[in-house]
Amino acid sequence: MRSSRCEAAQERRALARWVRKSNLDPVCVAMTMRCLRVRALSSVAARGLHGHPWREPSVVLGIETSCDDTAAAVVAERGRVLGEALHSQKETHLKTGGIIPPVAQRLHREHLDRVVKEAMDNSGVSLNELTAIATTIKPGLALSLRVGLEYSLKLIEQYEKPFIPIHHMEAHALTIRMLQAVEFPFLVLLISGGHSLLAVVRGVDDFLLLGQTLDEAPGDTLDKVARRLSLKNHPACCTMSGGEAIEYLARTGNRLHVEITQPMSRHLDCDFSFSGLRNQVNQIIIKKEKEEGIQSGQLLSCVNDIAATVQHTVAVHLARRTHRAILFCKKEDLLPQSNPALVVSGGVASNEYIIKVLQIVTDANGISLKCPPPKLCTDNGIMIAWNGIERLRAGIGVLNKPKTIRYEPKAPLGINLSEQVRKAALKVPHLKLNR
């Protein structure tokens, strides 16, 4: 841009010298110079900052309704959040003891339009000014996904905007790139109430799946243990989610007072399993209730110790599978030699204890650990809008007339290499994973 301005200035100075020698009318000179200045500035604008054709920066509306949070956000091309809004269903589901899909769907329908309008109002951008609309269509609760997709299709038809269908887990994986300079490829651990997986991220839509949960997700396990411990009756935990309550009580618990066997210790792969852990905890609770002579629904005296043990067992299980994934990536040269990174995202990534245990593994292997702030670890509209920005940049998955688009409650992520990981049978060296 600087060179373009210099060229224009040189042209004006040369013309001015010629006009003075020619003894022309000063008014004509002024008009000529003004026209030249406008022409020069127009030329600069047309060429852009780096000599490329100029275009408007992208602005994307992201809509998220995959589970129990109704969220929307407007994000600009460089990751600037222009506006956002969210309606949480947490209080409703705490009362019912879990997410009931028809209830979640009803609440999405009641609040989605308001949430989108609030995000748009906060952004100062009109729907006509949007570049595209991005919406989660997979995976998630079918009834919840349906609400977001149907609403979005009406918007794109009304305002004639491109539609960008979003894979929920891909969005979680790429959120960190909105905040930090994380280049492809990198290793990602996605842990939430509905998912648990390890994958290598090679591009915006290029994933290599190394392992995933065989039964339930860690967030689901923590929530179910919290319900079995009746933590909603605990005065300090009555407004917390199950995972939050477990983390809170674990801070003052002694995990050595309760013994739990580590899941899948003989399986040399990167898959996860948490149902067996939950069954062990249930048997321990039954035994303790008999010992203390209390009924189901009442609080055990050792509730803090159980919380500490469960949290530590989950953390170690995640850490050991992640350690094996790192070793496999090194063996197969799947990560860069310089500055390799592990990104941890999803709702369970908000658990500080689990992150600290994972930090022991990354420090021992010379890998940087990166994690979005807690606000962006849980489901939100910002990550959906940002994934839309990433896809616009790459020219991937942008639909102009999505007539046949469908939501997908179950959706695989990338190419599955879990069998290759299993065949490699890599043994993980011992690390002291105590925090």
Image (cartoon, helix red, strand yellow):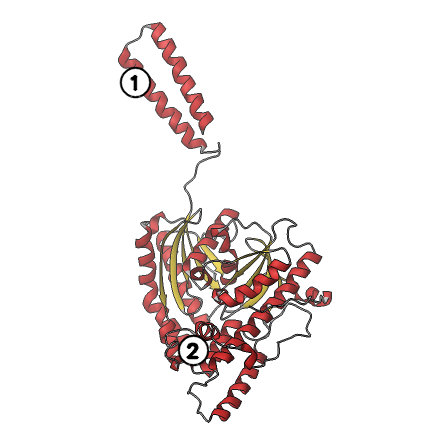
Q: Report x, y in % for residue 61.
A: 39, 54
Marks 1 and 2 sit apart, C-alpha to C-alpha, by: 74 Å
Residue at left offset 66%, top offset 50%? 337
Residue at left offset 47%, top offset 76%? 223
Residue at left offset 66%, top offset 64%? 324
Q: What amino acid is labelled 2 in the image?
A: Gly
58 sits to left or right of 363: left
The answer to which image quadrant residue 357 occupies is: bottom right
Q: Say which of marks 1 and 2 sits in front.
A: 2
Residue at left offset 63%, top offset 48%? 338
Q: Give whichever of 170, 402 is nearer the camera.
A: 170
Q: Is residue 413 visible?
A: no
Mark 2 element type: loop
Q: Report x, y in % for residue 333.
A: 69, 54
Decide which of tag 1 and tag 2 comes sooner along the chain: 1
Q: Report x, y in % for residue 310.
A: 53, 76
Q: Report x, y in % for residue 285.
A: 51, 86
Q: Is residue 24 visible?
A: yes
* Quadrant position of the N terminus in the picture: top left
Q: What amino acid is labelled 1 in the image?
A: Met
Q: Give whichever of 238, 87 is nearer the camera.
A: 238
In the rendered image, the vertical position of residue 422 relative to residue 117, given as above or below: below
The answer to which image quadrant residue 323 occupies is: bottom right
- Mark 2 lies on residue: 98
Q: Which mark is residue 31?
A: 1
75 sits to left or right of 265: left
